[in-house]
Amino acid sequence: MLTTNQLRSFKTIIKRRLAEIAQQETSEQEDFGLSQALVQQSTGELSNYDNHPGDTGTELFEREKDLSLDEHLKQEKAELNLALQRINQGKYGVCEVCGREIAVERLEAMPTAVTCVDHSPSNHTSQNRPAEEDTLGPPFGKFDNDNKDANFFDSEDSWQRAASYGTSETPSDFIDPKKDYDNMYVESNEPYGYVEEIETFITSDINGKPTGIMPNESHERYEETMDEYEQSMFEGSLEDSDYK
């Protein structure tokens, strides 16, 4: 059971924190910028449309962060007031679930605690998944043809082609430690603009880089040569069979 001196000490700590919150709520510099209703006020810009769309996204993130901080502050204030109320009712330091005493060490770390360690809400980890997962399918959905007998350019190929120029992801964003800057997305080595490796030579520019432009004159000559070769091989097999 907490002694009178301990209760007095915790009451002082709680009141001191409430005074800090009250001062913060009345200070224009410490209101998380929520007193500035318009984006122009917080950024100093004349218009909501900035020089770069990314700047608008940054301002949105900052405003969402400010709202979260303000919400946490209000929740802390409510918990502190509840702790004062429990002190006045003689319930402070007693778990509201099992009725056992809350360890002094726990109260020193968190003066607003209303449960013991065993019944702390933080011990429960929710297994609920976002509702969107019930309706959203895999990436690219029906426009992903990797599992089909198809070699045409689909939506996944479009993403891979765009990602080859760079993304905002870095190797540290992946669980697999083998990820590096040359392999930043799934199937990054998948051929683009060709099917067989030999075609990379035919469709390459003067620097040896695949152009992805097919068919071209070189490719047509290659096809004609391959057709003639296959025809000669076929005719040769017929002659061999006749000879036998």
Image (cartoon, rainbow, N blue to C red):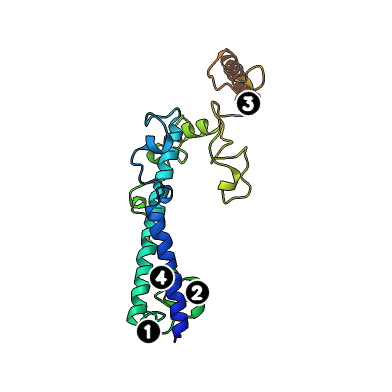
The one nearer the camera, 69 or 90, is 90
Instruction: Say few, some or many: other residues with alpha carbon within 10 Å of mark 4 (under 14 / 14 to 19 / 20 or more).
Output: few
Left or right position of 55 against 166: left
Horizontal and vertical percent position of residue 139: 43, 42
Instruction: Give the spatial CA distance, label 1 vs label 3.
Output: 77 Å
Q: Secondary structure at mark 1?
A: loop
The one nearer the camera, 217 or 193, is 193
Answer with mark 4 or mark 3, whichever residue precedes in sequence: 4
Q: Which residue is mark 1?
A: 99
- Image quadrant of residue 43? top left
Q: Secondary structure at mark 2?
A: helix
Amino acid type of the residue that numbered disc 2 sits on in the rendered structure: Glu
- Image quadrant of residue 195? top right
Instruction: Give the spatial CA distance, label 4 vs label 3.
Output: 62 Å
Q: Which residue is mark 2?
A: 108
Instruction: Say few, some or many: other residues with alpha carbon within 10 Å of mark 3 (under 14 / 14 to 19 / 20 or more).
Output: few
Left or right position of 220 against 66: right
Horizontal and vertical percent position of residue 98: 38, 83
Q: Which residue is mark 3?
A: 198
Q: Which mark is residue 121?
A: 4
Answer with mark 4 or mark 1, whichever residue precedes in sequence: 1
Instruction: Give the spatial CA distance, label 4 vs label 2.
Output: 18 Å
Answer with mark 4 or mark 2, whichever residue precedes in sequence: 2
Total marks shown come to 4
Q: Secondary structure at mark 3?
A: helix
The residue mark sitting in front, 2 or 3, is 2
Amino acid type of the residue that numbered disc 4 sits on in the rendered structure: Pro
- Residue 134 to residue 110: above or below: above
Instruction: Say few, some or many: other residues with alpha carbon within 10 Å of mark 1 (under 14 / 14 to 19 / 20 or more).
Output: few
Query: Is disc 4 in contact with disc 3, using a CB cutoff of under 8 Å?
Result: no
